[in-house]
Amino acid sequence: MKRILFLVQAIALPLAMIARQPVPVKPRILISTDIGGTDPDDNQSIAHFLMYCHLFTTEGLVSSPSFGEGSKQQLLDMIDLYEKDLPKLQQHVKNYVLPDDLRKLCKQGRKGAAPLKGYAAATEGSDWIVSCARKKSTQPLWVLVWGGLEDVAQALHDAPDIQHNIRIYWIGGPNKKWSANAYAYVVKHFPGLWFIENNASYYGLFSDTDAADTLKKNKYYDAYIRGAGYLGKDFKKYYGGTVKMGDTPSLLYMMDGDPANPLKESWGGSFVQFKRSPRRVFYDGTSIADTVAAYTVVELHFKGPVVALPEDSACFTMAVQAKIGEQKWPGYYAGNGDYVVRYAPKQAETVTYQVSAAIPGFAVQKGQFVVRSGWPGKPGPDDYVLGDNWYTDRPDSDLFYGIQQGARTVSKWREAVLLNWAKRWAWLQ
């Protein structure tokens, strides 16, 4: 009965909504992921990647948790599951990547957010990005960033020449909050990068209000995965099997059509060029009268005592109250009594914060500001100026999914994506 239902759904969809368009050249990719860190949806996205890995020339799998306890061991654990499922997968596709070849690509990146300057010290992961980017090739290296930008920022700092050899697709949004310092460094010093900043479009992959019942995110597991193989049994561990996979649109983008054209329709979204990245700098706090666009880099400066601390020392805390609850962010000493913290709000809301430090003479300070939807918002004098190849979520009002800008450029393909994947889960039954 389940197989009959699958065929009926597939026939009901227009052909254009089912078939992937050919990719001109098998793309070179490197995935930087915070798997095991902030959000277990990375495990889901890695499972998806492994089941399609024959479509890519994969050059790196880097663990880059800007927050949380992620490590490359989580990548290795997922590859172990893939190895057990490989015999069944190979009955349908012969050129799956060998597990040992994937293990060799797993590297440990930075654990934790970058300090104020945006970089710190080279890691195994950042060095690997440099090494891959410097390979002689007629193709760019696509760096798909599912978490923090710390290892990308470090690689660019250590080897600025690679900026012309890489193309970045970043799942920003909440990741931008944790990675605000690394982002600020990259956008200020490397405006000539080729860069897709997907702050909200990714949300379309788990937006299922209009989906067929079996394709709803909390129904898909029982309809199609059903504990298939070792990967399927593991999938149940994350959100009870509810499909999220917020990072997968970056991979889908590499599977459908010409990745060199971000303006096109694609399983991984459709984007627009933008010439400035919003930044607001405030001195001595903010009030409810201050308004910023979502995903803006908010840079708060506070005056305090001149102390004998090295510049860029984490020395105070900003406790933020927002819709998600309370989160705490480290602030840094910039010298000469200047204390700085960066924050990038991910959605429309009112943010309340309190700044405190165990430094004699540093007064507790409180403030608020309002975040509105609609990125990048009105131009401001503090904005980062971008080059010709930065792209982001489409701002059209009819492409919002709730408050998520551009999400319908992904959600329109969601059924096609999930039905295509269902065929592969059937291989593992």
Image: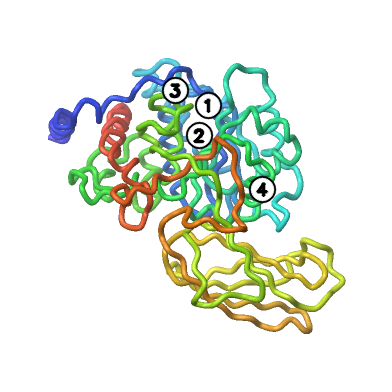
Q: Earlier in the sequence, mark 3 or mark 1?
A: 3
Circle 3/circle 1 CB separation < 8 Å: no
- Please name the residue that numbered disc 2 is placed on: 80
Q: x and y percent of residue 328 in the render? A: 59, 69
- Please name the residue that numbered disc 4 is placed on: 188
Q: x and y percent of residue 424 in the render? A: 32, 29
In this view of the protein, which residue sits in the foreground, 270 or 396?
A: 396
Circle 3/circle 2 CB separation < 8 Å: no
Rendered image quadrant of residue 254: top left
Quarter of the picture containing the N terminus is top left
Task: Check disc 2 and give the amino acid type.
Answer: Asp
Q: Earlier in the sequence, mark 3 or mark 2?
A: 3
Q: Earlier in the sequence, mark 2 or mark 4?
A: 2
Label 4 SS: helix
Q: Earlier in the sequence, mark 1 or mark 4?
A: 1
- Please name the residue that numbered disc 3 is placed on: 55
| Other residues around mark 4 within 10 Å, as few (<14) / some (14–19) / many (≥20) | some
- Please name the residue that numbered disc 1 is placed on: 99
- Tell me how far mark 2 sits from mark 1, CA to CA: 8 Å
Task: Check disc 3 and give the amino acid type.
Answer: Leu
Circle 2/circle 1 CB separation < 8 Å: yes
The answer to whether residue 245 is seen in the rendering is no
